[in-house]
Structures are given as structure tokens and as C-alpha cells.
Image (tube, rainbow, N blue to C red):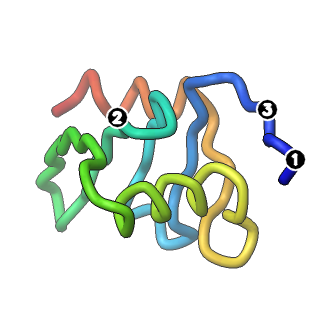
Amino acid sequence: MEQKKITYPQYRKYNNNKSFFKILSNTKFEEIQILGTKKTLHKFEAKILPDRNFIHDLTFEYKNHWLVCEESEYETLKLNI
């Protein structure tokens, strides 16, 4: 199986602009969730296969579920939490 190469961090978001992701590695990511005017930051570390699969999909198979997010968009949101 061919190994896919990627540089981190990678940034993704849902098309409704309610969740933003910063993928830090193949086992870690951050998520900013927006509910109304409230923003929350969650940090995740994958310890089980479904979580690692989620990060893989977020990184490589994202086109059906997520959009690429600009680093500046993510970091601006993070500053305002």
C-alpha cells in the first residue's frame, strides 16, 4: 500500500461554518465548534481506530464532507474564544 504524504497542520471546516478543524498529526486535531454566539475549542488525540479513521478521512478523503479552511480563518476564530 502506498503511503500518502502530508504536511501538518491541515485545516478543514464544515460547509455550514459551525465546525473548524486544525489537523495537527495523524493522531491529533483541534476543533472549534460554534453554537450561536458561543465558540468552544476541543482538543482530540486518537486512541482507537475509529478516531484514527476520522482523522485520516478529514485529512485525505475530505471532499465529500468538508471544505479546506484557511489557516488565518481558523486562527482568527481561535483568538476570539
Mark 1 or 2: the one toward you: 1
Instruction: Where is residue 16? Give x, y as percent.
Output: 49, 72
Residue 57, which numbered label?
none
Task: Give the image quarter of residue 37.
Answer: bottom left
Q: Looking at the image, which is closer to me, 63 or 49? A: 49
Task: Give the image quarter of residue 9.
Answer: top right
For mark 1, what is the residue?
2
Residue 5, which numbered label?
3
Please say if the residues under marks 1 and 2 sit with CB atoms less than 8 Å apart.
no
How far apart are labels 2 and 3 at the CA level? Answer: 28 Å
Residue occupying image coordinates x 45% and y 37%? 22
Instruction: Where is residue 25? Give x, y as percent.
Output: 48, 30
Q: Closer to the N terminus: mark 2 or mark 3?
A: 3
Q: Amino acid at mark 2?
A: Leu
Q: Secondary structure at mark 1?
A: loop
Q: Amino acid at mark 3?
A: Lys
How far apart are labels 1 and 2 at the CA level? Answer: 36 Å
Q: Closer to the N terminus: mark 1 or mark 2?
A: 1
Picture quarter with the C terminus: top left
Q: Secondary structure at mark 3?
A: loop
